[in-house]
Image: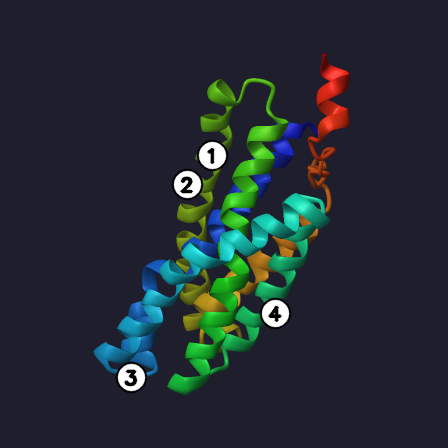
Amino acid sequence: MSVKFRLGIMMFLQYAIWGAWAPILTDYLQNTLHFSGLQYGFIMSILPIAMIVAPLIGGQLADRWFASEKVIACLQIIGGVILLLGAAVQSYAAMVWIMLVYSLVFAPTLALTNSIAFMNLKNSEKDFGKIRVWGTIGWIAAGWTLVGWRSLAKTVPAFAVRGDLLFLAGIFSIIMGLQSFTLPPLLPRKKGPTPGPSLELSRC
């Protein structure tokens, strides 16, 4: 598979995961789990806060110790398992912990996927938009998949799953984790020599 094709799949899955749960999580928390406005408001604020903190941690892992695509793979597989567990959660306290841990795992992947795309495109200014648009398509496709799933569940009750939005996002996340092992490598940066008198002398 070409690099652009693999990067397009990566973007599609990255935003399909997010699009499966983010637009309707409030409705699920309010009308299915019957959380109060303060409770679901706090849960919805967790991911934005994690996006401030987690990319710093994920960036350090990818920059110094592990290849970025392997970091994404591990984080997405872990995140997928967390989401599958979260689909069965009904208590407020448990949901807060599920979303907190998941957000800390998911947030770094947003920056890392962009880094992999930029570093593996010959003309990133020209080609990145063509790759990134697959993320928007993935977001939309996730919504239509959930609508289709719920329509099928009305006629075939065996397909009905409580927390189906989190369950679907978990499936997408595990698929992306496996797909990430096929991404072009982006190796961690190694520290260069520390400038000193000998290095400065060699430059003269």
Q: Amino acid at mark 1?
A: Arg
- Element carrying mark 4: helix
Task: Decide which of tag 3 and tag 1 comes sooner along the chain.
Answer: 3
Would residue 145 be seen by someone viewing this image from the given angle?
no
Q: Amino acid at mark 4?
A: Val
| Mark drawn on residue 34 | 3
- Element carrying mark 2: helix
Marks 1 and 4 sit apart, C-alpha to C-alpha, by 26 Å
- What residue sits right under mark 4 in the picture? 81
Task: Decide which of tag 2 and tag 3 comes sooner along the chain.
Answer: 3
Q: Are marks 4 and 3 in contact (CB under 8 Å)?
A: no
Q: Are marks 3 and 1 in contact (CB under 8 Å)?
A: no
- What residue sits right under mark 2 in the picture? 136
Task: Decide which of tag 1 and tag 4 comes sooner along the chain.
Answer: 4
| Mark drawn on residue 38 | none
On the picture, is 36 further left or further right than 165?
A: left
Q: Amino acid at mark 3?
A: His
- Element carrying mark 1: helix
Q: Nearer the viewer, residue 144 or 76?
A: 76
